[in-house]
Image: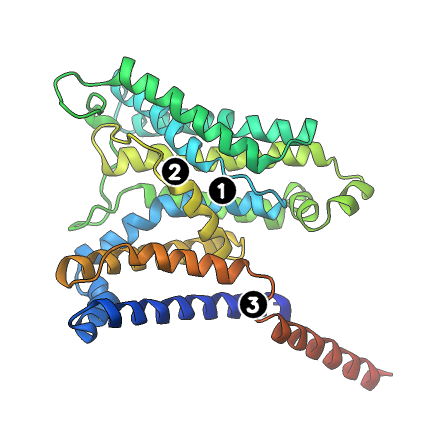
Amino acid sequence: MSRERTFNMLRTAVSMIAAMLVAFIIILFVSDQPVESIKIFLVQPFSSRRYLGNIVETAIPLIFSGLSMALLFQTGLFNLGGEGVFFMSGIAGSLVAIWFQLPFYIFPFVCIAAGAVTGILVMLVPGVLKAKYGANEMVTSLMMNNIAYGIGCYILNNIMRDPSVSSLVSYKYRKAALLPTVISGTRVHLGLMIAILCVVIVYIFLYKTKGGYEVRATGTNIRFAKYSGIRVTKVIILVHVIAGAVAGCGGIVECLGLHKRFEWTALPGYGFDGAMIAMLANNNPFGVVGAALFVGYLRVGADLVNRFADVPTEMIAILQSLIILLISAEKFLHKYKQAWIEKDVNIGEVKNEGVF
C-alpha cells in the first residue's frame, strides 16, 4: 500500500474522530446527563441483536448508494443522480412486485432486474449528456432527480395508489416478491448478500479488468487517458451504466426488504448519503462496506440517545456534515501529507544509493 493511500486512510480516521468529539461536545451542552447520554450513544447499539440488526439494515442501502458514487468518483465525475435512481427503481420494481405473479425463488430477482434497468435508463441521461456534449453532470443529475421524482409521483398517484389506505402508498407487494430475512430476531434481509455480491463484482471490475483500468485512468487524468488511446466517451457512458444498475438494485432492494408496499413520498436521501460513504471509503468498494456500517452505527446510536436520553437526532446531521467537510477539504492535514510523502521519497533514494 502506498504511503499516500495510507495517509488518506489516516486522515479519514482523524475526520471521524473529530466528528465524534464534536458529538460529545454537543451532548455535554444539551444533555442533563451527558455521561449517560454518551454511554448510550457509544455502547447501546451493540447491546442486543436487534440493535446490531438495525445497524446492518441501515447500512444495506448505503452500501448500494456508496458503491454507485464510488464508481463515479473513480472516473472523476460528481454525479448526484442516485436520488432519482433510488426513487424510480423503487417505483419500477414495485410495479412488477404488485402486478406480476411469479415463483418465490425468482420473483424478487425479476423485481431487482427491473429496478436495475430503470436505474441504468435514469443514470444514462446525465451520462450521455456529459460524454457526448460536455454537459456538467452535477447540474444535469440534480435536474434529473426532480424529473424522476415527478414521474414517480405521477405513477404512484395514478397507477399504484391503494385507495383503501388514507396515506399515499401503493398496493401491497405480493408475498413471493419480498426479500426473506436472513438473521432471526432482526430485519436483516437477503439484500445484504446482494449488496456484498455487488461490492465484489465492482472491485473485480475496477482492479482486475481492462475496463476498470480505463475508468481509473480517466479519473486520474482525463487528458492523459485520451492521449493513451482510451475512448473516454465510452468509459463515461459505461461507468454510468454500472453505477445506475447498482443504485437501481439498491432502490428496489430497500423496498422489498423492509416494506410491504411502496411508501416513499419524497426522495429518500440515499443519493447524497452515497457521496459521503464514497468519501469515507476513499472510493474503495470494500471500504464502502465499512463506511456504511460506521454511518449505520452513528444513526442507530443517535436514534437510541434520542429515545432514551434528551439529545436530538439532528445531531447526526451535524456529524455527517462535519465528516464531509473534513474529508473533502484538501488543506486538512495537508502539511502532514507532504511530509509523509516526502519521507517515502527520501527512504526510496537512500535505498537506491545503497544499491549502487
Q: Is residue 200 visible?
A: yes
Q: Where is 16 relative to 242, above or below?
A: below
Q: Position of residue 199 (x, y in %)?
A: 46, 47
Cβ atoms under marks 1 and 2 closer than 8 Å: yes
Q: CA distance from mark 1 to mark 2?
A: 9 Å
In the displayed structure, does residue 267 sit left or right of residue 325?
Answer: left
Residue 283 horizontal/vertical position (percent): 54, 53
Counting from the top left corner in percent of width and height, residue 112 is at 37, 30
Q: In the image, is residue 331 above or below residue 136?
A: below
Tag 2's secondary structure?
helix
Instruction: Mark yes or no: residue 196 visible.
Output: no
Q: Label 3, label 2: how many angstroms apart (C-alpha)?
A: 32 Å
Q: Residue at x 45, y 52 (%)?
A: 276
Asked which secondary structure carries label 1, the reply is helix
- Would you name the residue on which mark 3 appears? 332
**Observer-nearest residue: 278 or 114?**
278
Which label sits on residue 254? none
Secondary structure of residue under mark 3: loop
Q: Dot 1 corresponds to which residue? A: 68
> Among all residues in the image, which is located at the extreme right?
356
Spatial CA span between label 3 and label 1: 26 Å
N-term mark: 3 or 2: 2
